[in-house]
Image (cartoon, helix red, strand yellow):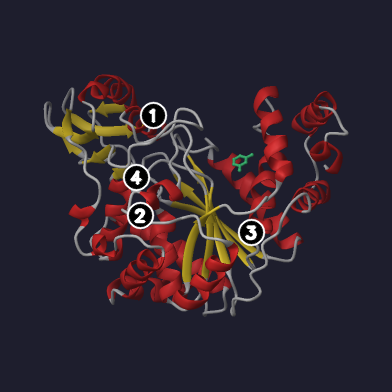
Amino acid sequence: VKGVVEGSIPDYQASALLMAICLKDMDEEETLNLTMAMVASGDQIDLSEIPGIKVDKHSTGGVGDKTTLILGPIVAACGVPVAKMSGRGLGHTGGTIDKLESIPGFNTELTRDEFIKAVKANGIAVVGQTGNLVPADKKLYALRDVTGTVRSIPLIAASIMSKKLAAGADAIVLDVKTGSGAFMKTVEEAKSLARAMVKIGNGAGRRTVAVVTDMDKPLGNAIGNALEVKEAIEVLSGKGPQDITEICTTLAGKMLDLAGKGDFKSCKAQAEEAIRNRSALEKLKLMIRSQKGLEDVVNDTNLLPKASYVKEYLAPEGGYIESMVSDRLGVASMLLGAGRATKESQIDPAAGITLLKKPGDRIEKGEAMMVLHANNPELFEAAVKEIDKAVRISSQKPADLPLILDIIE
Ligand code: URA
């Protein structure tokens, strides 16, 4: 790993090793050793100045996944410090940093000292990645991308866990998503990845738990940056959609459990109470104030950026909505301006999609199924074409699948 980062091992040799791993797999010990070597390739964040057990959370990406915006404030309101580094979105998946930056003025670029100070003062701060964390992953991921070796469970597990371990938390809760909108398309694949990551975390001396959750349909009703912030505020006000509320109180319950706040059942109840008594909403407001954002958005979501044009997407036929392929909706949202086609693309914070109906709902022909938001009306046509491919309507009501598919300790 050192040789790959320094450049003394040429790319063709590293690529051959990656292909060998992809074809032959790695055992638990090899995967842990690779991960620890990757962690050691760059900076490691020291959070020991912050008192208490610091618990981090990672979601394996998704469409409409605003869980960090919701569970960060919940966990902080329950007395567990949240020192979170998050990423930006790429392609059809969104990123927490882009979502937070849709709040006017919100600063995600704190120095290390400002970050630690904010967590000590307020119990929570969410920032973009600082420092040179895991340069080995940047190098190896780029090679994996061009050699068709991304889809290897030990390589994915080492890539994700090296970044989590370098970010310095004492314990880690993983939200491993499965389904059409996720990296892992089947439940079995998601469970294997979850097991591999839990073994790495525990092997590295950090208590780690994974929750396998369904991403076959988008989470909540909003896709797009400001639209998702608005929905997160609604969830923290106790008025959000049931699916995202349930996932967030489950993940928050697991984080509190790892931080020693009681057993899972009582921790989940504490998370629910933080929504009911509005202490989590107050934490969000405090975090926004501390990071120089417009805190009034919490009381009045009309202050968030709004698109100049909206268009309803109408049901092409009547029946039950059988499926909405989430990654296609993610692509449609990106085409409206909410996402980045390439790393360099600019995003439009106001753009995106609001779902008025979800899989399992009945709909009449011509009834509005979603609302598209854009600042350029010419973007609607391509997005609608993508949504046409995402939606399937049937005469039969589809089976209701559970949201939480497994918990791996
Ligand atoms: N996310 C990562 O960070 N790494 C992978 O290899 C796959 C998804």
10 Å crowding of disc 1: few (<14), some (14-19), many (20+)? many
Q: Earlier in the sequence, mark 4 or mark 3?
A: 3
CA separation in Å, label 3 and label 1:
30 Å
Mark 4 or mark 1, earlier in chain: 4
Question: Residue at 53% across / 73% down in the picture?
Answer: 117
Please, is residue 190 above or below residue 201 in the view?
above
Query: Whole-percent x and y of residue 196?
Result: 69, 49
Marks 4/3: CA distance?
A: 24 Å
Q: Residue at x 20, y 25 (%)?
A: 377
Residue identifier under label 2: 244
Q: SS at mark 3? A: loop
- Label 4, on which residue? 225
The front one of 335 and 260 is: 335
Residue position for label 1: 331
Ligand 1's quadrant:
top right
| Spot occupied by residue 57 in the image (x, y as percentages of width and height) | 54, 59
Residue 374: image location, x then y, percent: 24, 32
- Give residue 51's quadrant in the image: bottom right
Q: Quadrant of the C terminus?
A: bottom right
Give the residue type at disc 2: Ile
Pointer 2 local density, CA inside 10 Å: few below 14, some 14–19, many at least 20: many
Q: Which residue is label 3 attached to?
A: 167
